[in-house]
Amino acid sequence: MAETPILSVRNLHTEFAAPEGTVHAVDGVSFDVFKGRTLGVVGESGCGKSVTARSILGIVERPGRVTGGEILLQPADGGTPVDLLKMSPWDMRAVRGPEIALVFQEPMASFSQYYTIGNQIMEGIRLHMGLSAKAARARAIDLLDMVGVPQPARRVDEYPFQLSGGLRQRVMIAMALSCDPRVLIADEPTTALDVTTQAQILDLLRELQQKRGLAIILITHDMGVIAEMAHDVAVMYLGRAVETGAVKDIFAAPQHPYTRALLRSIPTVMAKPRTRLPTIEGSIPQPFNRPVGCAYHPRCTEAVFAACRTEPPPEVGVAGRNVRCYLHGGLPGARA
Amino acid sequence: MTGAATLLEVNGLKKYFPIRKGLLRRVVGQVRAVDGVSFAIRKGETLALVGESGCGKTTVSRCILRAMMPTAGSIKFTIAGSTVDLATLPRKTLRPLRRHMQMVFQDPFSSLNPRMMVGDIIGEPLLINGMSDRAARRKRVLELMELVGLPGAAINRFPHAFSGGQRQRIGIARALALNPELIVADEPVSALDVSVQAQILNLLLDLQDKLQLTVLFVAHDLSVVKHVADRVAVMYVGRIVELAETEALYHRPLHPYTEALLSAAPTPVPGAVSQRIILERDIADPANPPPGCAFHPRCRHAEARCRETRPELEEIEPGRFVACLRANELALRGIAAMTGPAL
């Protein structure tokens, strides 16, 4: 890809200090996000996908903190990239909203119940764009119309509890887009929704991306959603991206044993009725008790090297993607 | 599976919840959560009840277990040669029957008492049903733990020490403790991670083969259902719109709602999306369902008569039930058409 990424995450580390020990929630994650493309970040619970999103926006809650790496944002005018991690909290406020915006998973929990949705959308518009109350209201109505809320001029004065789950998520998207961000982070945007509503919201996101050239980071646990929405994907397991590359390649020929096993274990409507699924043995380790070495090795059926148990494999390039597995080289001591 | 005796027969089941308003809490309306549902489950089969939130699938399962009193209809349960109507049975007479029908819950975190040890959780139904001998109970608990794939050493540990998948195994062991005939599993894998979900689904299939269980599997996810069900009933706003053998329903749906649901299910195949049917608007309100067919405002095949006449569930081919006025004239797309030439 010759194009420069809008957002480039390099070797990100985020830790949570707890009495039981330090949890390395994000442990060296790197990926690039491009204009008009969707990067899917997929993984099971505890893999650090949401913490990665929060780290990018600088909203990791205490006791968590970002301890290393770079998050490089390409300025709109094409200048040299700035590192968001080196920005002051005050300057970060100008990034959240106009540059990078977030759509949360649970629309009911992320709205205030005491303000109308119009009020909540207008807050960001007035703050970042300096519009008058009247102009902000007009913009809020336009935004609601754009995301497909019927009768936007009436709905703008309603409260979140008056809306259905699907409408609430549309309003959430309108709010995220209110300041024309270049990057949209959607954290499980459809997990709380029914399948038919999920289809509507995914369709909306695709349409908005085509119209405005948005770069989207889509965080999900659902490989089906990834297959449908994403151009690129980062598969995460316990804080590390084990495989990163183009969606087509990864679904066609997964290179990491975890990706392979995960893809096989997904139920699909195409299966023969009552067929047993291949499984991944064991369960996801507790965060305080992460395996040493490659975090996946206790469940891996392909692990063959002593190094898997002692040292995490480095990221190596294989078949047009990055993989963290000794099967593809990088063994300590060996010279490729 | 055909020819097996019927274990459970639900007929015209209704459950209305009153809407109360004002100072006097007067009843101003009814939420018709379940509005005339009929189906039968044969011994040894898995029937899946599928639908989106608010369609009444959970209410049906709760009525069957009599966790709720149905408003109308009958639920005939055949046990040891005699048939009883669970819908009308008084509480006292119901009690000895409860051991024959057990439930597996959705959320393995809130359905296990955090202050009880695993052995006590699994053993509680035994204790309640008169197995007072400690040693015998312990033996049975260990047997059950082995059956569901839990290490025996876990007997003295608390639920918090277990992952979601293992907790769900504890819940399943508890449900199996009394050798029930019928297991009602309400979204048993939807709270689990993908890699663990497959383990639990396989466990359910194995247990069913081993113990000849009959299962009512309540779920929203059509891909999960495909892996466990013999037959599938699709619900929409309190009614069953289609009921058929799994393979037939997925390959040649007869109701437009089934077609839309199938096409909305995300498939892990890149580029499979082109054939999607996007339903407009939201699910109808069960307190105020549209006249005629409840699905007509969202249906792309709706005609004038769909707005007036409410279709009843009819058997239009052997084993295939559908509630659609146009069922005989529509050629709907099944899963083979939806993924395009890629598969």
Image (cartoon, grey):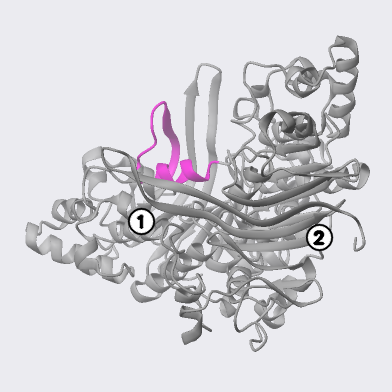
Mark number for residue B145? none
Quadrant including the N terminus of chain B = bottom right
Residue matched to label 2? B230
**Is A244 above or below relative to B202?**
below
Q: Is residue A51 left or right of residue B97?
A: left
Of all chains, the one bearing label 2 is B
| Magenta segment | A48-70
Query: Which x, y percent locates residue B52?
Result: 55, 58
In reply to whether residue A53 is colored magenta, the answer given is yes
Say what secondary structure mark 2 lies in: loop
Residue B268 in magenta stretch = no
Real-space CA distance between mark 2 and mark 1, rounded to the nearest whole angstrom: 36 Å
Q: Nearer the viewer, mark 2 or mark 1?
A: 2
Q: Which residue is mark 1?
A: A168
Q: What residue is at 66 percent from the left and 81 percent from the top? A: B333
Q: Secondary structure at mark 1?
A: helix
Chain letter for mark 1: A
Q: Is residue B183 visible?
A: yes
Q: Position of A220 compared to B269: left or right?
A: left
Q: Position of residue B329 (x, y in %)?
A: 65, 89
Where is residue B257 shown, x and y percent of the image? Answer: 58, 72
For the C terminus of chain B, give its image quadrant. bottom right
